[in-house]
Amino acid sequence: MGFKLAPYLSFSGQAEDALEFYRDVFGGTLQITRYREMPMEDLAGDPEWVMHGQLTLENGVTIMASDAPGVASGSQISMMIYGDDRDELAGFFEAMHNGGSVTTPFEPSPWGSWYGAVVDAFGIAWGFEGGQPAAESA
């Protein structure tokens, strides 16, 4: 039996904006459950905040997020997107740094493929790695 691993990102009032941004970048189907929709009383947090959000991409990858009182937006993890299509990775890289900042330009890496890194507008660090190895100089 196989298993899947999905990142679960914590925010303080920005989970919906972050998930919608990631949907704009990667596509997929977004489902959001708000605190006000939960059948429990006295939940901490704004009733409009995301109790659980899930973005399911066409390739089976899932990104989950929620808002939680007292949590600083962003996280201690880095997300890594890797694959064989350099142009697709470059497109993700360009879209993801919109409103954020580039920490490493997307360019040929010393280990032979392409690599770039950004911190998105929500404080999440993303790395993009792969594609065809950079052409050797003649």
Image (tube, rainbow, N blue to C red):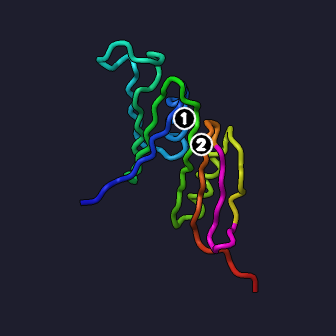
Where are the magenta residues, as a range? 108-119
Task: Pick the quarter of the image with the C terminus.
Answer: bottom right
Residue farthest toward the top in the current orientation of the protein: 42
Residue on which the image places disc 2: 124
- Side (left or right) of 8 relative to 80: left
Instruction: Estimate the x, y position of residue 28 in percent, counting from the top left.
Output: 43, 43
State the SS at label 1. Answer: helix
Does 13 sit above or below residue 91?
above
Q: Earlier in the sequence, mark 2 or mark 1?
A: 1
Mark 2, other Cα within 10 Å: few <14 / some 14–19 / many ≥20: some
- Give the amino acid type for the residue marked by disc 1 in the picture: Ala
Residue on which the image places disc 1: 18
State the SS at label 2. Answer: loop
Q: Is residue 72 inside the magenta stretch?
A: no
Does 33 sit above or below residue 84?
above
Q: CA distance from mark 2 to mark 1?
A: 10 Å
